[in-house]
Image (tube, rainbow, N blue to C red):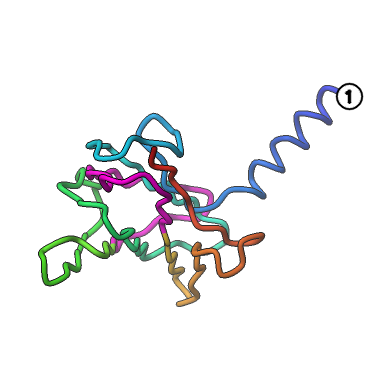
Amino acid sequence: MQKILTLSAALLLSFAAAHATVRTEAGTSESAAGKSETYRLNVPVEKELATTQVRLVIPAGVGISRFQVTPGFARTVTKNADGLVTEVVWKGDIASMEYARFFFQAVNPAQPGELVWKVYQTYADGSVVAWDDTQPDKTPASHTTVK
């Protein structure tokens, strides 16, 4: 009985702690300076509504080179005057109790530091959850340490 309760508590905590995250393809939050890296953005639906849009703000110094096709989603990018991708928006539906992963390749900044990935998740009712550290205890941004 104790084992079942412990497993149930761990499962509930994992759902409560679920949020939009950016990690390397290997699942880490560390990478090397100047390295070409494949990143994955994991977006779980935490409401009884579908997610209809995911917006990712690219940290300064990160050079996006390509994206993996994500069936069912239309992708648009915003670039700065130098032609670097600064923002990506995926539009499509992620149903309640589902999640989606968006993969992209990028080159890390040449200098060590910390990357802060800001994600904005829009639901079918128009509400937006800002995973951008405005409320770090509730809606944290993902951080990648570049060494």
Going by the image, does 1 lie left or right of 12?
A: right
Where does residue 128 sit, x and y in percent of width and height?
A: 48, 72
Is the N terminus in the top left, top right, bottom left or bottom right quadrant? top right
- From this view, report whether residue 115 is shown above or below residue 119: above
The residue to which callout 1 is attached is 2
Number of callouts in the render? 1
In the rendered view, would you say 120 is above or below 23?
Answer: below
Residue at position x 84%, y 31% in the image: 5
Disc 1 residue type (three-letter): Gln
Find out whether residue 105 is within the magenta segment: yes
Which of these two is toward me, 44 or 81? 81
Given residues 38 and 18, the one toward you in this image is 38
Majority secondary structure of the magenta segment?
strand
Q: Nearer the viewer, residue 51 or 55?
A: 55
- Residue at point 57% right, 57% down? 46
Q: Which segment did they paint magenta?
A: 90-117
Residue 78 placement: quadrant: bottom left
**Residue 57: horizontal and vertical position, in percent?**
34, 63
Q: From what the image shows, is residue 135 above or below residue 107?
A: below
* Quadrant including the C terminus: top left
**Which residue is painted at 27% across and 37% down in the image?**
37
SS category of the residue bearing label 1: helix
